[in-house]
Structures are given as C-alpha cells and as structure tokens.
Image (spheres, rainbow, N blue to C red):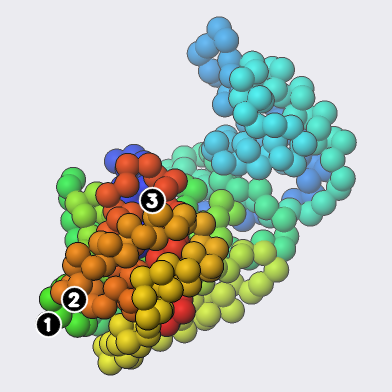
Amino acid sequence: MMLEQASREWSNRPADERFGSLVAMKEAALNFRNAAVISRVDTKNLHVSVETDFDSDNPKADDIVLNGSTGTKAKLTNWSFNQLCLRAGAPSTFMQSLTADTAMRALNEGLAKAPPAKGLMLFNRKSGGKTDDLTLRALTSQRYSRIWNLDIIERLQELETRGPWQPAPAAFDGSRGLYMGDRDMFAFMVDSNRRIFETLPGGGLSRGFFTRNSEVGASSFEIVTFLYEYICGNHRVWGVTGVKELRLRHVGRNNEVAMQEWRVALREYSEASAAEDEAKITRAREMTLGATKDEVLDMVFGMKTGATRKQIERGFAKAVEHEEWYGSPFSVWGLAGGITEVARDMANADDRYTLDNAGRKLMEIAF
C-alpha cells in the first residue's frame, strides 16, 4: 500500500512552516513555548470589538479582536476565530464573509446567549512587544490537556542522536518531512540503516513513522508506524505494510500520561529487532489464501474490503507477473504486493485508496 500523509504536508505547507532539521524545528517550538500565555476564563465574559487602526473601506472579519476584562485585547488566528465562532454558535465561513462590524455584533450576541462555561485560552505574546500585544491561538474547554510540540521534538532529537533514526530523506525541494505552524506539527522519521529482507529479489524494507500534534486542539496526538520499500521525491511512501496507529485525544487526560504512552509505543517500535519484523513477513509469505485462483479471489472478496472482484483479480495477475519479487500469488504477502502495485498506477485517488485499503486489510490477517 501507499501512504500519502507526508506528501500532503509537503504539498500544502507554506515555506515558513518547513524545517530542514530538528534543531531548527526545536528553536521555533521553543519560541512558541516561551511566548505562550495561558489564561483561565469564564466564557460569559468574552466579547469582541473591531480594531480601529485598520486601513480598509470594507473591513472583514479578520479585523475583529478579542477584548479582555482588564482592558487587554488580542488578535485572532484563523483557528481561534473558528473556535470563537463555534462557541457563539455561528458558522465561521459565513462570518468571514461579513464586514467586521456585522460579524462583531453577531458574535457578541451569540457569545452572550451561549451557556456559561469555563475555558482555557492560549495566547502568544509578541517578542519585544507591548504587554497587551497578544494573539489568541486557542480557546478550549478546561478538560483540554495540552501537549507541547517542544516536548515531542526533544524526544525525536533523542532518537536522532542515539541513531539510526533521522528525518525523512530530502524531497524534491529539500524538505525533510518536518513541518510546524501555529495550528499543528508533523514529523516524518525513518530508520534506513536497519533494512530487513534486503537480500530478497523484491528488495528490503525500512521502518518509518509519522507523528502529529496540535497545541491548539486542531487534531489528536498521534503516531503511525509502518514498514516501507521506498520514498518518492514528493514523500509518498510506497510498499507499506504493518501499519499501526496510536491516537490520543487531548481531552480528559493528563499531559504526562499521554506523553508516556507515546514514549512507550515509540520505544517499542524503534528498538524492535529486525528478527521480529522478519518473522511477521515470513508468516505472511507462508500463509496461503487458497489452492486455486478462484479460491483466493473468493476469500479476499468475501472480506468486504471495498475492492471489486475485478480489482482483486488484477492484483492477482500482477502478483503472478512478479512472483520473483513477492513470492507465491496465493499467499497473503504475494497478493498484497500485487494489489499494492496495481493501486500505485491508478489515476483516481479514491480507487487507489480503496485498493490500498484492501491490501492493508489483507496483511492484517498475518500481522
């Protein structure tokens, strides 16, 4: 199968959210952390106003600022504006189409009618700025448990220092799979030195993982581990197998507990011996799905993976064609390899995902 998460990050992140090293990424995360101001608030006291020093004859919603009870004010990011709209019961996309004055009145009316609640607010104070030079990055409930990007990056640095883990090989533009903005962070790490089954005709496999986090509630804290054959210059990951996901919500759990679960999962994966992975793959190579082609197709189609029988049959034909790479097309490993190769060449992304998912479910039988 093929994973596209890193490729989407590579395609969509602006230049100022790309990092060439964990050192540079840590410096940016440290700046975020040092500039952070956390405040507990009674949401019934929230209200907004229109910034008066803008230069526009047609002000938009991004001219709105949040006013504090002590006279301070804070600018809003797109994300915190969305959270504020959610609190006010207003659709953020529509609010952004209004003039600032109209949006302000609608927001204040919605905030006044919203049920009272306690919340956590995360601000960033501009370096060297005035005491009230703030930007609201997040408005969350008090149950929200924040995990700082800095803590994650420091752990990734430990893996890199101890080796052989490192950021992903450079993409076409030199990007190393390290991204971070005011909304979330994403890191793509690989272990290219301890390849397994290197001597087989189909080539070897390497370990890799993605990890994602958001300090502002934009996504869960997650790690996706996998084995892979190779990585394209646009950071698509091909020949993927053994995918495992750990996803931790930021709500209702202690920060340190969540971090400990992540450390344990990452340690077990990063320190696992090649013999363990080789044993899993050997099991997949030896596990037979049927004695005839029709038995194999019936078996896999009956798993209801979403793939059509015709698509599975194409995968079987590709496995037969490259039996010297994948092994027996009647095996889990052989058929999964053929299915993945067919999916790779599909032009339609939905069809490619469906067939990739079929290959993934097939591998789960043996793994």
Q: Is residue 172 visible?
A: yes
- Characterize the local packing of mark 3: few (<14), some (14-19) or many (20 or more) Cα atoms within 10 angstroms: many
Picture coordinates of residue 74, whole percent (x, y): 60, 37
Residue at 32% in and 50% down: 7
Q: Amino acid at mark 1?
A: Thr
Residue bearing the label numbered 3: 352
- Characterize the local packing of mark 1: few (<14), some (14-19) or many (20 or more) Cα atoms within 10 angstroms: few
Name the N-terminal-most of marks 3 and 2: 2
Q: Quadrant of residue 27?
A: bottom left
Q: Which residue occupies the foreground of this view, 223 or 313?
A: 313
Residue bearing the label numbered 1: 199
Q: Quadrant of residue 209?
A: bottom left
Residue at 29% in and 68% down: 337
Residue 107 tag number: none
Q: Amino acid at mark 2?
A: Gly
The quarter in which the N terminus is drawn is: bottom left
